[in-house]
Amino acid sequence: DGGITQSPKYLFRKEGQNVTLSCEQNLNHDAMYWYRQDPGQGLRLIYYSQIVNDFQKGDIAEGYSVSREKKESFPLTVTSAQKNPTAFYLCASSMFGIMVSGGHEQFFGPGTRLTVL
Amino acid sequence: DQQVKQNSPSLSVQEGRISILNCDYTNSMFDYFLWYKKYPAEGPTFLISISSIKDKNEDGRFTVFLNKSAKHLSLHIVPSQPGDSAVYFCAASRQAAGNKLTFGGGTRVLVKP
């Protein structure tokens, strides 16, 4: 059955280490997105990709990197340059450029909670 | 600079009554608006959306109203049920900017039995 998977659900990292969060979708969606949610706040866009081998910075890209080598996969690396990486990370996908059910719905994965020790 | 704002961080409502969630935006170029529901430690799920060419869209218990002149949208849930207790986010997008969504800060809804 189709959907978006994120792994792992919980991740612990020591300060100064890079860590990669996985996001896979089998919805045949063109576009994929990474968001970050902090307690009591909304979702903020980190990076997005509208097509394979292309991606753009979102509002808070500093300290993060991504790749889009396959349509199904959009991994996010949290680098040691990210000053406050502890947060809930959400991956999403959508049919870019096509009005599905009238618009731009994004479908979200279950999220990964990253804690820096 | 918050382009999408939800000024009420929380809302408490009795089961069976109406829940009204509000959202304001500043960017007049937004042409599509969405509402998402989120439970703790889960990803948001899409609820309902509205194009800027409409002023109302209804889907079962959920109705979204859009007032473009006031740059305001609202979500009505009637009747409210205990399972509706969650955080609700409004989001906005511009077709010219692809499917990038700008989210509000969320409103936590508690439906009391």
Image (cartoon, rainbow, N blue to C red):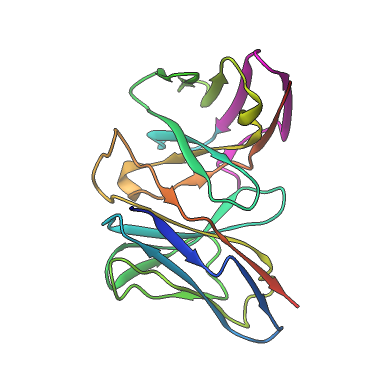
On screen, residue B92 versus residue A3, left or right, reads right
User: Dividing the image into 4 quarters, which one contains the C terminus of chain A?
Assistant: bottom right
Question: Residue A63: x, y in percent?
Answer: 57, 76
Q: Does the magenta stretch include residue A12?
A: no
Tell me, yes or no, if residue A17 can be seen here: yes
Q: How many labels does the image show?
A: 0
On screen, residue A30 versus residue A112, left or right, reads left
Q: Quadrant of residue A71?
A: bottom left
Residue closest to the far front: A1
Above or below residue B10? Residue A58 is below
Question: Residue B91: x, y in percent?
Answer: 50, 39
Residue closest to the far bottom: A16
Look at 40% across and 47% down and name the residue there.
A106
The range drawn in magenta is B1-24
Above or below residue B111? Residue B25 is below
Above or below residue A37? Residue B89 is above
Q: Does the magenta stretch include residue B9?
A: yes
Residue closest to the far left: A98
On screen, residue A103 versus residue B78, left or right, reads left
Question: Residue A70: x, y in percent?
Answer: 28, 72
Question: Residue A3: x, y in percent?
Answer: 38, 54
B113 or A95, which lies in front?
B113
Look at 33% across and 23% down and name the residue there.
B53
Look at 58% across and 84% down and name the residue there.
A18
Tell me, yes or no, if residue B28 can be seen here: no
